[in-house]
Amino acid sequence: MITYWQQENGRLLKKDREELDPQLNTWVDARSVARDDIRILEEDFRIEQEHILDILDPDELSRIEREDDYILTIARIPVFATSGDISYFTAPLGIVVVDRFIITICWTDCEMLRDIATNRMKGLNLADFPAFIVKILSRADTMFLRYLKEINRRSTSIQNELQQSVKNNELIQLLNLEKSLEFFTTSLKSNQLLLEKLRKTRILTFDSDDRDWLEDVEIDNRQAIEMTDTYSNILAGMVDAFASVISNNLNIVMKKLTTISLIMMVPTFITSFFGMNVPLPFAQSGWIGIIAISLICLVAAMAAAQVLLKDKPSQPQKKARKTLAQRRKERQMVRMMRIQEKRLEKIR
């Protein structure tokens, strides 16, 4: 879908193609591009099909290049999607400057483009295309940092759920977050190369204010890279640790089931013995025999439970025992020292 925007009194206004003022710069917003949109971009704005296909490639890296009729910039931007296993990923955003038009092309919709269209980004100026591009890159870094904090919060909540879990659902969620961080790392490093090229080359002409702002964007991008690396290392360690936690939780459950099976085995053995086709006591006693056998099974089960479920000493008890043992050793040392002192006195 392609929409057209022009700026009046500092605000972006959506207009039809026929209503556009030829004296004003125009932002052409092409999101969720379809086949008809590609045809319009080729015929009306003279953008090569090869470049459009590069922008629509989900794995395309950031770059900038100058053609005969336009300047093409491709940057990676973060995207949040509620559907799908991986909620956070990145997508290429193509920015084409041709005549009095600046065209953004993306194969999906994202929060950053919606912020521009709803005038939630302050300081946008369509009259200055280089500054407009720098603002978009700055907003992308801001969204990266915001999504990184959200990923950190989600990993913390999943961590609390994993402590009592014996299933793999939470572990899979952590692995998906780890994939998102890998996507962020690759995209941020690619954007860093783009920012350095913008600063060093003369493809786009920046004034002094734009160059200062571009340096700030580079700083924010490096900060996002460092945060992504840190969160990736933490999450990788967390995944390994909680894989062991899930295994330990499963072992505890199996231990309890094994203990219950052993307890039930004792009365099962007794009833099996009394069910053999041989003369046994209580065979002709009626209800008395049933009651007697039930009491025997109950006593045997309680005895087995007492043996198998015998509580181990708690941590405070263990500490108390260690303290008592240390005190005994100290007393023995004092006694030995006193004995040695007495011996030395006798020798003197």
Image (cartoon, helix red, strand yellow):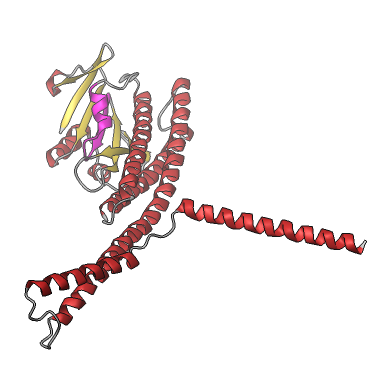
Highlighted range, magenta: 100-118
Residue at horizontal 17 percent and vertical 82 percent from the top: 273
Quarter of the figure that contains the N terminus:
top left
Residue at horizontal 27 percent and vertical 23 percent from the top: 100
Rendering quarter of residue 18: top left
- In the rendered image, residue 175, in percent from the top left (x then y), is placed at 32, 52
Task: Say if 251 sits above or below 109 in the image.
Answer: below
Q: Relative to 310, is 222 on the left or the right?
A: right
Residue 66 visible in the shown view: no
Q: Is residue 129 magenta?
A: no
Quarter of the figure that contains the C terminus:
bottom right
Nearest the eye: 292 or 133: 292
Q: Is residue 117 magenta?
A: yes
Rendering quarter of residue 326: bottom right
Nearest the eye: 37 or 175: 175
Residue at horizontal 15 percent and vertical 35 percent from the top: 40
